[in-house]
Image (tube, rainbow, N blue to C red):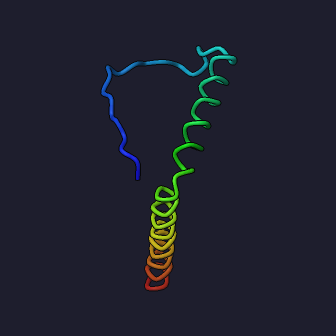
Amino acid sequence: MPDMMIVKTERLNVKPSDIPSHVADGFARATLRAVERYFSDPAVKVEYEKWLEKRRNDILCEVNEEENHENIY
């Protein structure tokens, strides 16, 4: 997985409705390109698939536990 740089900044309070559409579109396009570049790395894809499988299994376990709990009462 590629190294990531974390930059801490001060917290900003911005209402999405205050952002002009053309600026929001630019943010969205830039974010999409960054995500596409990140996931183009085969190692990232492998890690993501592992995470996704675990997440799916965790959700199934939660659902099964809820169903079992409901059947008890």
The image position of residue 7, as x and y in percent, is 33, 29
In the foreground, 64 or 30: 30
Residue 20 found in image quarter: top right
Q: In this view, does 33 lie to the left or right of 7?
A: right
For the point 62% across and 30% down, the residue is 28
Residue lying farthest to the bottom in this orientation: 72
Quadrant occupied by the C terminus:
bottom left
Give above or below for 57 relative to 25. Answer: below
Residue 19 found in image quarter: top right
The image position of residue 69, as x and y in percent, is 43, 79
Give above or below for 10 relative to 51. Answer: above
The image position of residue 4, as x and y in percent, is 37, 41
Q: In this view, does 2 lie to the left or right of 34?
A: left
For the point 47% across and 74% down, the residue is 66
Give above or below for 70 relative to 22. Answer: below
Q: In this view, does 22 lie to the left or right of 12?
A: right
In the foreground, 44 or 15: 44
For the point 43% across and 85% down, the residue is 72
Residue 51 found in image quarter: bottom left
Count of residue discs: 0
